Structures are given as structure tokens and as C-alpha cells.
Image (spheres, rainbow, N blue to C red):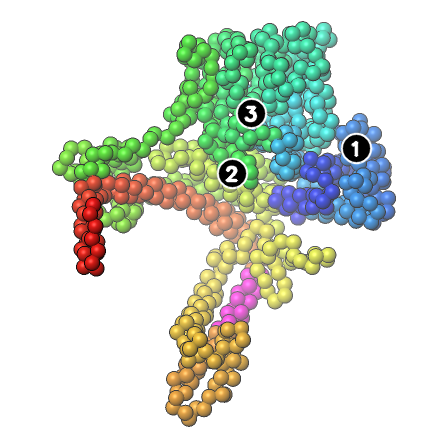
């Protein structure tokens, strides 16, 4: 069976547990990623004479696997890696981790066991990359990306800068316009490439391929980038180690900087030692003609290097801290000159705390030399408020990424979010080329102003109701059904009780029509895309599928009022990430008919525990259904049987409730049933039976207790009988379900997966957006009604009345005082 992405991630991440004790994440990532690399190239290229990677004899993962339990496993793994490195010019790349380092891996038996267990994890048959060729490169590349993100998270502030968050990389890849590349000999460059993830995300946008260049100063991070290129099937990418500013590797024959078609860059923020190794005032590459950056802050040095490294038609995107937009002195002069040249096409302000090396907010500066001369302004986006929390970091949601890209590429002006800022405004003396986004885009929400007159005299201000105009445009008669004018002009009152607001909205004919229209929108999308989903076959492309599905969904909900199409988009993308993606990868690897097979789960030999949760249990056996959960089989084929089980369970729960009520009423310390409880404080069959035997049935004083005991005993018998019957009915149902799986036809499987599982979940998700509309309107009306419900004169009157009552009570008690 094909590898599920989620299982691949968890399997590889589990390998980190074998190493965590002896070192931090910035160190153990080197061991895990090297093993992943060796396993991948061994599975993919071993035995192939003309492969891009040569796997020499004695240099494969199989040779590593043969060392499990060997006392010299660490030293011998080093030798295996050395052979692979030697055969492929990867010395200093894949051999940076010492597998015989006792300070990190322990000594003697500890090292032997740790490395044996680590190799065994990668030996799992489920991690056979040779059998996952439909989109195997993407599958493994995404796993590598997952590890990079987790390593960056665990490495902390000081050591996580090797990784650019994938969401930011995707934005840069889209806005830089590399999808316009027509030929594979066009070039893309990253002068501070880190692990290479940003370069690869950008290169992936080039439909016809692109030639990759990168430079990275850190030795271990440079090695990550080289491995990353190979794992993403870009073995010919040129990644060099060195200081880009002091010693740029890529130059032409005449000694000038090599120029590229595209560049994407996430340099170290505010580098203090950026001048090490060269004199920027006498730069042989003429990068600082617009001014030399401050000695202790290299942000503009990287920006100027990128500009100098782009062709006259080149385009780029660079991540920099927000300070570059407004800092003064030398940086102000550089900024002024760059803006005047027209090189900056756009600026995208990002949320704070996205990056692993720093918590400060950053921006993407989009560069375009080709149309610089005719540029009239800079397109700005304030995307600082769109994110989710992810542990101790913030993270862009898929909807944030998509909205940023759509708005930027289409140059859409949206209030409080984006606008084209003309150079005349930027150069105005009051701004003086300050590019701080809040100067040009006010992203704050309108203030909710309290109305003093309404607090004094009552009534809801009409201007607050007018602010709800987007709702009244969709529900034109709802406002007059909810509100009526008061005698004073400009104010209204609520015609119904506050408790009835939500049902009044939800049951209003116009809201009912709106709900039906929303249902039709989703039904139209589902009807159009169900055939596309059911047409999937072995070898189909999951990424192309989700792109088509999401694009169509955005189009369908583009003009739906009150609902943000990107919120609907997020529902699809979240479900894709958590469930649907795994399902699709299984289908394109094994076909639809693999869905009619159940897996019998086996306990791990060492831990004696199951490695995953089961879907249902029959006898002592636990089963897992990878594509079709049993509830969908039951819902479609065994509704009557499930209803019988449900009825028994309802009766059983009622019996338990009756027992609990007897306990509550008579089981207390002085209750008639107190003596019928076991030492545990509960009724048991034995404790009740013993108490019955202890009582004289002929003694009239025992009559009431005996009656209660017999009632308890009857309920206990009924509960036990119901429990047994439920078990028998449930087992019979599960047996029928198990027998049904292999009988499912391909058409039935497609209906179960596409209609009953995927589309049903997405339909329910879209319904939550309708609920949000009604809740938002209800909440605001409730807030306004409650805010002005009790005007000041009424409050004063109530206060005086209550004060007089207190005074009267105190007077009757003989107390009085002077105010």
C-alpha cells in the first residue's frame, strides 16, 4: 500500500525520539535528514546505470540495515556515507554528521542500540520510496519540508533561521512571476538560500523548468540545501558555500556579478557583521551606488546585492524587517534612490512572529526591473492581521496565502487591506519616501462609538443600524420586521424580545432564501466536481486536482454576499490537509479498489501497543479502514441494524439513569439504600443480594427498603441483559460490515468516498459559514439592544427606589444616618 503523507511524517519524526536525549534539534536534524537522504536515493536510484545519483556497492541503505546490532555500527555507517559522498561529489554535504560521535550518541551498547533503532525506523516497508513514483518526489519533498519546520521550531530563535516558512515561500514564488518563465535555461537565484526551501518553492512555479543557483554561508545549512535539491529531483542545481556579500560565487568571465532572471531571498535580518571580508565603499561589484548601508545593519546590503544580480528584465522578492521601510539617515537615502528608480513593484506587510530566527514583523519587497521606467506607484498590502497561532509562532493560513497572491497579482484595491500608492504621495514632503504601510493603509476596524443621547433617553441609534447595511442589502425587509422608529428622529427600538432575535432572523423568509441560495452554490460546485473526483485513477496528480477544486470553489463563491470566499476556501484546504490529501494519494497509488480492504492491526512487538487507532473491534481483533470509515458503510447499507443498536443503547442509558436516580434519592448516608452499597460506594449485584438476604421479609419495617432493593435488582438485571444484547447486536453489525467491504464495487466505493465522506464533510463546513452570518448579525443586534436598554433616567429611578427600600429596612431595624 502507498505511503500516507501523515504516516510518512510521523514515522520519520519518530526517528527523532531516538536522538533527542543527546543533542538539540539543530544537531539531530543532520542525522535524521542524512538517513532520509540515503534511504531515498537507495530506493530510487540503486541498480540504475544512468541515474543522476550513483549508489555504489557498500554505499546504500541496505548496507546500513545490515549493521543493526553491530558493535561498530557508528563507524561503519560513516564509511557507507563516505562511499556515497565520494561517488557523487557530495563530500562535505552528506557526511557532516558523525555517526560515531560518543558525545552525542552515547558509548558502547547505548550507541549500538540507538543507531540500530534509528535504522530500523527507516527500514519500515511502508517507507519504500521506490514504490511511490506517481508523485513520489513531491511526497518526500513535503516530508522534508515538514521536518525542516519542526526542526526550526525546536531549534529556537538562535538556530532556526535556516528555514523560510512554506507559506511565505509560496507567496514569494507566486508574486515574483516565475510562472511566466518560458524556457528551462531561465535562471533563479537565492544569495542566502539556507536549506533551499524558498528556492525550490519558487522553482516549482516554473511550468517549463528553471535553472537554480544558490549560495549559503553556513556549512551545515549548505549541506541541507544540497540534499534538499536532490530530494526534490533537482540534482543539477548549483548550490555553493560562501559569504555572498564578501565573496559572491556567481560571476561572469569579466568579473562582474552574474545576473539572473528571478531572485527570491530571505537574508539574515539586520546583520551586524555584514561588512566582514570586504570594503563596501570600494565594492568591486558596484552594488552600493545608491548608498552604503549602516555598518551595523546589513538589510539594504542584501537588497542592493539582489538588485545588482538581476537582469534588466529581472524580477525578485526579498523578505526584510519592517524597519527598512521607514528607518532614516543612510537607509533613508538608499530607499529614496531605489524608489525613484522604480524598482519596487510592491510591498506586502506580514504578521509578526512568523519567522524562526526572530519575532519581529517583516515584509516582502517585490522587485521588477523590467517595467521600472514606467512605474507610477507601489502596490501595498497590509496582511498583518491574517494568521493563526501555531505553538509559540504565528502561521499564515492557506486562505491568507491565497488572498495575498490574488490581490497582488490582480492589483485589487480593498479598503483597509490594499491599495496602489502613487509616487506623488510617496514623494510628498510629509511622507518623504517613508514606505511604512500604516501611512498609506489604515487597517484598523472602525471604532464602535457609544451614543450619549441614547444612553440618556433610550433607543438604538439609526447610524448603528445603518452600519449593518451589508445585511439589509441581502435581507431588505428584515430591518423593518425587527425595528420600529421611536418618537425622536434618528433612533429606533427593537420590536421583539432579545431572546427571539436569532429565531426571528433564522426563520425570516429572506434568510431562508439566502440559505437556499448558499446551498445551491455548494451543490453546483459539488455537482461539477464530483465527476472530476471520481475520475481519479492510478497516476493522477493530486496537486493539480486540489488546485482545480479550490480554483472552482473560489469562483462559485466569488459573488455570494456576506460570506468571504477565502473562508470557504480555507475549509476545503484544511480538510485537504487533514484527511482528503491522504485519501487521494492512496487512490492515485493503489486505485479505488484498495478501499474495500480492511487492515488487521497488530501490536508492536516491543511496546505491546497498537501504533494507530482502530476504526472498530470484533472479538479480540482490531480493524482499520484507510479510505472508507465503517460509519459510511453502516449509513448506506445497515441503517436498520444501527437503529436497533441505538434503540438498545437508549434503553440501556435510561436504565442507568433510573439506577442513578435511586442512588441520588435513597443512597445517601441516612438513605434506605445506604446499606446496599459495596465498599466502593456503588451498588453491585452482590452487595444488593447480600442486603436482601440480611433483611427479614416478614418485618413490616423492612417493606419499603425491600421494595427499593428489588427495584435496584431488577434494574441491574435489565442493565446487564441490555449490555449483552447491545454487544451481540453490535458484533453482528460489525460482522456484516466486514463482510460488505470486499463486496463493494468500484462505483459503490466512489460514491462512499466522494459523496458520503468528502462532499458531506465539506457541505457541513460551508454550513458553518451560514451560521456565522446569523450569529454575527444576532450578536450585534443583541449588543446594541442591551447597550441602550436602560437609559440613565430609568437607572436613576431604579437606584432611588432600591435606596429607599434599603433605608426603610434599616429604619425598621433601628439604624439611621445623615447623608
Element at label 3? helix
Residue to which mark 3 is pinned: 172
Residue 747: say if magenta: no
Q: Residue at x 58, y 29 (%)?
A: 358
User: Is 805 left or right of 607, judged from the image as shown?
Assistant: left
Residue to which mark 1 is pinned: 95
Instruction: Give the quarter of the figure containing the C terminus.
Output: top left
Count residues near mark 3 (Cα–Cα under 10 Å), then give few for <14, some for 14-19, many for 20+: many
Residue to which mark 2 is pinned: 389
Q: For the residues carrying marks 3 and 1, which lies nearer the camera in this image? A: 1
Is residue 185 depicted above or below 397 in this figure?
above
Location of residue 791 in the rendering, given as x and y in whole percent from the top left corner? 21, 41
Location of residue 122 in the rendering, given as x and y in whole percent from the top left corner? 73, 44
Is residue 267 depicted above or below 778 in this figure?
above
Location of residue 267 in the rendering, given as x and y in whole percent from the top left corner? 62, 22
**CA separation, marks 1 and 2?**
36 Å
> What span is in magenta?
721-739
**Mark toward the start of the polypeptide (3 vs 1):** 1
Residue 731: say if magenta: yes
Q: Is residue 311 visible?
A: no
Quarter of the image where one finds residue 171: top right
Which of 539 and 65 lies nearest the eye of the viewer?
Answer: 65
User: Is 111 left or right of 691, judged from the image as shown?
Assistant: right
User: Is 409 left or right of 243, judged from the image as shown?
Assistant: left
Which of 142 and 659 lies nearest the eye of the viewer?
Answer: 659
Amino acid at each position: 500500500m502507498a505511503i500516507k503523507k501523515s504516516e510518512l511524517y510521523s514515522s520519520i519524526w519518530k526517528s527523532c525520539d531516538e536522538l533527542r536525549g543527546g543533542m538539540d534539534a539543530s544537531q539531530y536534524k543532520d542525522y535524521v535528514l542524512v538517513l532520509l537522504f540515503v534511504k531515498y536515493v537507495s530506493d530510487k536510484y540503486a541498480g540504475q546505470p544512468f541515474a543522476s545519483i550513483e549508489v555504489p556497492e557498500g554505499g546504500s541503505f541496505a548496507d546500513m540495515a545490515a549493521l543493526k546490532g553491530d558493535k561498530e555500527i557508528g563507524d561503519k555507517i560513516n564509511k557507507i556515507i563516505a562511499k556515497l559522498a565520494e561517488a557523487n561529489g557530495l563530500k562535505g554535504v552528506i557526511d557532516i554528521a558523525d555517526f560515531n560521535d560518543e558525545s552525542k550518541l552515547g558509548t558502547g551498547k547505548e550507541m549500538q542500540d540507538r543507531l540500530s533503532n534509528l535504522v530500523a525506523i527507516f527500514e519500515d516497508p511502508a517507507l519504500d520510496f521506490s514504490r511511490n513514483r506517481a508523485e513520489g518526489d513531491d511526497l518526500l519533498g513535503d516530508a522534508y519540508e515538514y521536518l525542516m519546520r519542526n526542526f526550526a521550531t525546536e531549534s529556537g530563535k538562535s538556530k532556526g533561521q535556516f528555514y523560510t516558512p512554506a507559506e511565505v515561500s509560496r507567496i514569494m514564488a507566486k508574486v515574483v512571476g516565475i510562472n511566466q518563465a518560458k524556457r528551462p535555461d531561465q535562471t533563479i537565484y537565492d544569495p542566502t538560500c539556507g536549506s533551499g526551501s524558498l528556492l525550490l518553492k519558487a522553482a516549482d512555479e516554473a511550468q517549463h523548468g528553471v535553472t537554480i543557483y544558490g549560495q549559503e554561508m553556513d556549512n551545515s545549512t549548505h549541506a541541507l540545501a544540497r540534499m534538499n535539491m536532490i530530494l526534490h529531483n533537482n540534482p543539477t542545481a548549483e548550490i555553493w558555500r560562501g559569504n555572498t556579500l564578501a565573496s559572491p560565487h556567481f560571476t561572469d568571465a569579466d568579473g562582474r556579478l552574474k545576473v539572473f532572471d528571478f531572485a527570491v531571498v530571505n537574508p539574515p535580518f539586520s546583520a551586524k557583521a555584514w561588512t566582514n571580508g570586504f570594503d563596501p565603499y570600494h565594492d568591486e561589484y558596484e552594488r552600493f551606488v545608491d548608498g552604503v548601508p549602516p555598518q551595523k545593519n546589513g538589510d539594504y546590503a542584501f537588497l542592493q546585492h539582489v538588485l545588482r544580480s538581476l537582469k534588466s528584465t529581472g524580477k525578485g522578492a526579498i523578505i526584510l524587517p519592517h524597519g527598512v521601510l521607514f528607518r532614516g539617515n543612510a537607509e533613508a537615502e538608499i530607499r529614496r534612490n531605489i524608489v525613484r528608480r522604480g524598482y519596487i513593484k510592491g510591498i506586502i506587510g506580514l504578521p509578526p512572529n512568523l519567522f524562526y530566527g526572530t519575532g519581529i514583523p517583516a515584509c516582502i519587497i517585490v522587485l521588477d526591473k523590467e517595467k521600472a521606467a514606467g512605474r507610477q506607484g507601489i502596490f501595498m498590502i497590509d496582511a498583518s492581521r491574517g494568521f493563526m497561532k501555531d505553538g509559540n509562532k504565528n502561521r499564515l493560513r492557506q486562505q491568507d496565502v491565497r488572498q495575498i497572491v490574488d490581490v497582488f497579482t490582480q492589483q485589487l484595491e480593498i479598503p483597509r487591506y490594499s491599495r496602489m500608492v502613487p509616487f506623488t504621495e510617496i514623494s510628498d514632503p510629509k511622507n518623504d519616501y517613508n514606505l511604512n504601510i500604516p501611512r498609506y493603509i489604515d487597517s484598523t476596524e472602525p471604532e464602535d462609538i457609544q451614543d450619549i443621547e441614547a444612553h440618556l433617553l433610550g433607543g438604538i441609534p439609526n447610524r448603528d443600524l445603518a452600519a449593518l447595511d451589508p445585511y439589509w442589502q441581502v435581507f431588505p425587509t428584515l430591518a423593518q420586521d425587527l425595528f420600529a422608529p421611536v418618537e425622536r428622529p434618528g433612533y429606533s427600538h427593537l420590536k421583539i424580545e432579545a431572546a427571539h432575535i436569532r429565531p426571528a432572523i433564522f426563520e425570516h423568509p429572506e434568510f431562508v432564501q439566502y440559505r437556499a441560495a448558499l446551498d445551491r452554490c455548494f451543490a453546483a460546485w459539488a455537482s461539477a466536481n464530483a465527476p472530476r473526483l471520481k475520475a481519479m485513477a492510478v497516476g493522477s496528480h493530486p496537486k493539480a486536482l486540489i488546485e482545480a477544486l479550490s480554483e472552482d470553489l473560489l469562483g462559485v463563491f466569488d459573488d455570494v454576499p456576506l460570506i468571504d470566499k477565502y473562508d470557504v476556501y480555507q475549509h476545503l484546504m484544511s480538510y485537504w490537509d487533514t484527511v482528503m490529501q491522504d485519501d487521494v494519494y492512496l487512490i492515485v497509488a493503489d486505485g479505488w479498489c484498495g478501499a474495500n480492504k480492511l487492515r488487521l492491526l497488530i501490536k508492536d512487538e516491543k511496546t505491546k501497543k497498537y501504533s494507530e487507532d482502530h476504526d472498530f473491534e470484533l472479538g479480540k481483533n482490531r480493524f482499520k479502514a484507510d479510505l472508507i470509515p465503517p460509519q459510511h458503510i453502516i449509513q448506506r447499507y445497515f441503517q436498520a441494524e444501527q437503529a436497533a443498536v441505538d434503540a438498545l443503547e437508549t434503553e440501556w442509558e435510561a436504565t442507568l439513569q433510573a439506577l442513578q436516580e435511586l442512588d441520588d434519592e435513597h443512597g445517601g448516608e441516612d438513605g434506605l439504600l445506604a446499606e446496599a452499597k459495596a465498599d466502593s460506594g456503588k451498588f453491585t449485584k452482590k452487595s444488593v443480594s447480600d442486603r436482601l438476604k440480611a433483611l427479614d421479609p416478614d418485618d413490616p419495617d423492612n417493606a419499603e427498603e425491600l421494595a427499593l432493593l428489588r427495584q435496584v435488582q431488577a434494574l441491574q438485571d435489565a442493565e446487564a441483559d441490555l449490555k449483552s444484547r447491545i454487544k451481540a447486536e453490535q458484533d453482528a453489525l460489525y460482522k456484516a460490515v466486514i463482510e460488505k467491504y470486499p463486496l463493494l464495487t468500484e462505483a459503490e466505493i466512489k460514491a462512499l468516498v466522494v459523496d458520503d465522506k468528502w462532499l458531506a464533510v465539506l457541505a457541513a463546513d460551508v454550513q458553518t459559514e451560514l451560521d456565522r452570518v446569523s450569529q454575527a448579525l444576532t450578536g450585534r443586534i443583541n449588543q446594541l439592544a442591551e447597550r441602550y436598554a436602560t437609559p440613565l433616567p430609568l437607572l436613576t429611578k431604579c437606584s432611588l427606589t432600591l435606596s429607599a427600600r434599603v433605608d426603610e429596612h434599616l429604619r425598621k431595624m433601628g439604624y439611621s444616618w445623615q447623608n
